[in-house]
């Protein structure tokens, strides 16, 4: 995914069964499954500790001890506590990018972004729950929103993701992202709607995938009317 300037990349996401087919019983497949289980256990334990006791108050040693591994083992999987916090979100973002890359060229940018989002949610709920419960995912979201250091990291990551998506859109449309502002503008509008939808979901009680899908669909569907519609007309009242 490159434009006329260097690509902004996201960290590579480890996935279950990477290195061998799901049913593999060979040494490589077994080894990779054990590594994935350890990585998932570190994520679950870290997020449970962060949400229960606080991000700043939780140490890497405590996370490693909860999984019965050494600090050295922790650093084989994650460079920092911050990386663990956003590990599941990285997985969600990677799934969205994959789906966006598959959207047909006949879809206009906002349509492609909308459809990629909704299609990615067809299986992302199961992917999240293979690592952590959705309820813990919501608690993590709330913890991030209430932790200044993580809010800053969240906005930095979101900015990097927006730039990556804008470059992808520019490539789809055959545009120079540095010369034509439209890819960044449409991604900014899309991202704003997604942030509001996520906030509404995070403040609610329903942690289901159906809930986040419904809220997301509602807010994305309102982009066109909100930007171009007559708010004061009969239908806007």
Image (spheres, rainbow, N blue to C red):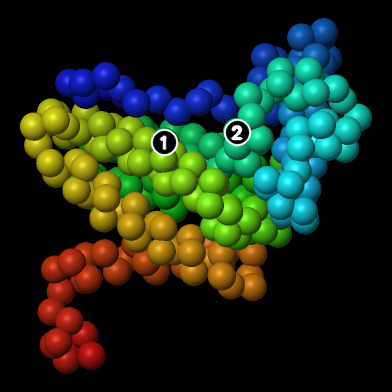
Nearest to the observer: residue 200 or residue 32: 200
Which element type, helix, strand or loop, lies under badge 1? helix
Q: Does residue 77 appear left or right of residue 114 in this picture?
A: right
Residue 161: name its quadrant.
top left
Q: Position of residue 159 (x, y in %)?
A: 36, 41
> To which residue does mark 2 refer?
83
Q: Which mark is residue 141?
A: none
Residue 172 visible here: no
| Residue occupying the point 28% across, 32% down | 168
Asked if labels 2 and 1 touch by Cβ distance under 8 angstroms, the answer is no
- From the image, which quarter does the C terminus lie in? bottom left
Q: Which mark is residue 97?
A: 1
Q: In 3D space, how far apart are the residues under numbered discs 1 and 2 (Cα atoms)?
A: 19 Å
Q: Is residue 147 above or below residue 1?
A: below
Q: Position of residue 148 (x, y in %)?
A: 53, 52
Residue 72: name its quadrant.
top right
């Amino acid at each position: 995914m490159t434009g006329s300037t260097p690509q902004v990349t996201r960290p590579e996401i480890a996935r279950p069964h990477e290195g061998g087919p799901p049913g593999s019983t060979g040494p490589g497949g077994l080894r990779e499954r054990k590594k994935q289980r350890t990585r998932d256990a570190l994520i679950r334990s870290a997020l449970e500790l962060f949400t229960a006791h606080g991000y700043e108050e939780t140490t890497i040693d405590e996370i490693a001890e909860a999984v019965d591994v050494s600090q050295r083992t922790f650093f084989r999987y994650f460079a920092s506590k911050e990386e663990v916090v956003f590990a599941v979100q990285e997985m969600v973002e990677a799934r969205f990018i994959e789906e966006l890359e598959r959207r047909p060229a006949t879809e206009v940018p906002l349509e492609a972004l909308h459809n990629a989002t909704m299609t990615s949610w067809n299986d992302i709920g199961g992917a999240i729950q293979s690592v952590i419960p959705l309820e813990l995912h919501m608690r993590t979201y709330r913890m991030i929103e209430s932790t200044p250091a993580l809010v800053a990291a969240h906005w930095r990551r979101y900015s990097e993701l927006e730039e990556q998506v804008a470059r992808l859109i520019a490539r789809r449309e055959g545009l120079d992202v540095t010369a034509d502002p439209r890819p960044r503008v449409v991604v900014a509008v899309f991202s704003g709607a997604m942030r509001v939808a996520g906030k509404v979901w995070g403040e609610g009680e329903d942690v289901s995938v159906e809930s986040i899908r419904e809220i997301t669909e509602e807010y994305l569907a309102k982009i066109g009317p909100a930007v171009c519609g007559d708010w004061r007309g009969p239908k806007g009242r």
